Amino acid sequence: MIAEQTLVNELKNKNTQAKAFEVLVDAYKERLYWHIRRIVLNHDDADDVLQNTFIKVYRSIEGFKGESKLYSWMYRIATNESLSFLKQKSRKLGVSNEELQEHLIENLQGDVYFEGEEIQLKLQKALARLPEKQKLVFNMKYYQEMKYEEISEILETSVGGLKASYHLAVKKIETYLRAD
């Protein structure tokens, strides 16, 4: 993979932008898809949000100042797009965010793209009950094995706060899995 700064420069250059954007999409589409999928839970919704994320990245690259890593910036966009999507969906359906999460979990079993076993389904149910921040931190730390410093850049919050959120999330998940 080409160096990040080189990629950013090529993304900002109108002559090299299209090719650089192809490189960017190839490099990050799978990681971003799974990050989004763990938030929105549905394959088709994740595809839509991923597409919106890349459109926003493409349109906003000029404003990228390089104060964070490129992937941190894209993860922040993907996270915000995912959360906005869920808010819009719950408003459209006239349900609370919690009710929407329950609905998404129920539909997960019938999702042909969900390859999880029973324990994965139980874990997803436990995650759906977590507060938004704890869910995001858990997903990034547990599934994507990100370092707290990387998550801190993406969520724009302190490492100490993230560690506390992760610890609380793990405790709540353990409690839920034992009770079930």
Image (cartoon, rainbow, N blue to C red):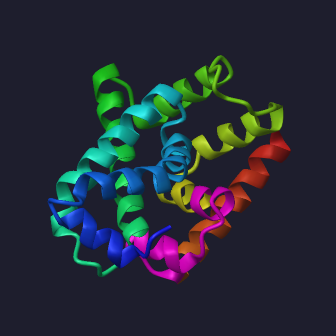
Residue closest to the eye, 102 or 72: 72
Tell me which corner region of the image, top left, top right, bottom left or bottom right, holds residue 91. Answer: top left
Q: How many marks?
A: 0
Is residue 174 positioned above or below 100 on the image?
Answer: below
Residue pictured at 48% horizontal, 37% vertical: 40
Is residue 27 positioned above or below 124 on the image?
Answer: below
The magenta region covers 139-159
Q: Is residue 21 magenta?
A: no
* Quarter of the image with the C terminus in it: top right
Whole-percent x, y for residue 42 in the image: 52, 29
Is residue 96 positioned above or below 25 on the image?
Answer: above
Is residue 156 positioned above or below 117 on the image?
Answer: below
Whole-percent x, y for residue 115 in the image: 73, 30
Residue pictured at 39% horizontal, 57% vertical: 24
Q: Is residue 142 magenta?
A: yes
Is residue 60 visible in the rendered structure shown here?
Answer: yes
Question: Relative to 74, is 145 on the left or the right?
Answer: right
Residue pictured at 81% horizontal, 32% vertical: 117
